[in-house]
Amino acid sequence: MNLTLEARILQEVIEHAKAAYPNEGCGLVSGTRFIPMPNIAQSASEFEMDPAELIKALRELRTEGEELVAIYHSHPHGPLRPSKTDIERAYYPEAAHLIVSLAELEHPRVAAFRIANGEALEIELRAIV
């Protein structure tokens, strides 16, 4: 299993992570677009999507026949892997989890994971033009 995204979507995600710095940024990714979401935790070590905005975005995806392919969040200072909290709060096991590490702000790193049954498995991330 892998995650394939258009390069422009991946770039939008990275730019959003940088804009949210020093807090975690978060959002949703469909097959065709990135949907930035407010991080109501406003924290450098955790994220929580606004529930009303999340429901609205998921309804919009469903109405437009789009599929949620990934949930994104950033780790402004942390490692490029899901935290224990990320794994515990992975409520959409069918979606990949995309993490942007800004530990080196000028050289962001991105990885994708499948999180299910309390385990995180790194999957291949491909960017297409």
Image: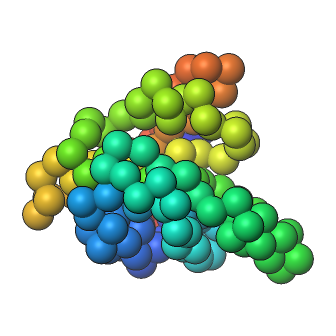
* Residue 49 visible in the shown view: yes
Horizontal placement of 79 versus 2: left or right? left
Quadrant location of residue 17?
A: bottom left
In the image, residue 33 lies at what x, y percent?
58, 76
Instruction: Please give left or right for residue 90 compared with residue 47 in the image.
Output: right
**What is the x, y in percent for residue 23?**
32, 58
Q: Is residue 104 above or below residue 86?
A: below
* Whole-percent x, y for residue 76 in the image: 26, 52
Name the residue at the right extreme.
Answer: 63
Q: How is the image coloured?
A: rainbow
Query: Disc count in the image?
Result: 0
- Pick whichever, 39 or 125, lies toward us: 39
Please name the residue shown 56% across and 20% down the image: 119
- Who is closer to the viewer here, 92 or 44? 44
Query: Which x, y percent locates residue 49?
Result: 59, 58
* Camera sees residue 129: no
Considering depth in this image, is 121 or 47 the residue closer to the camera?
A: 47
Could you tell me which residue is drawn at 52 percent across and 60 percent down? 40
Give the vertical position of 123 relative to 98 (above or below).
above
- Residue situated in front as seen by the camera: 29 or 21: 21
Against 91, is 32 above or below?
below
Q: Quadrant of the N terminus?
A: top right
Residue drawn 41% across and 30% down?
83
Q: Is residue 28 above or below residue 70?
A: below
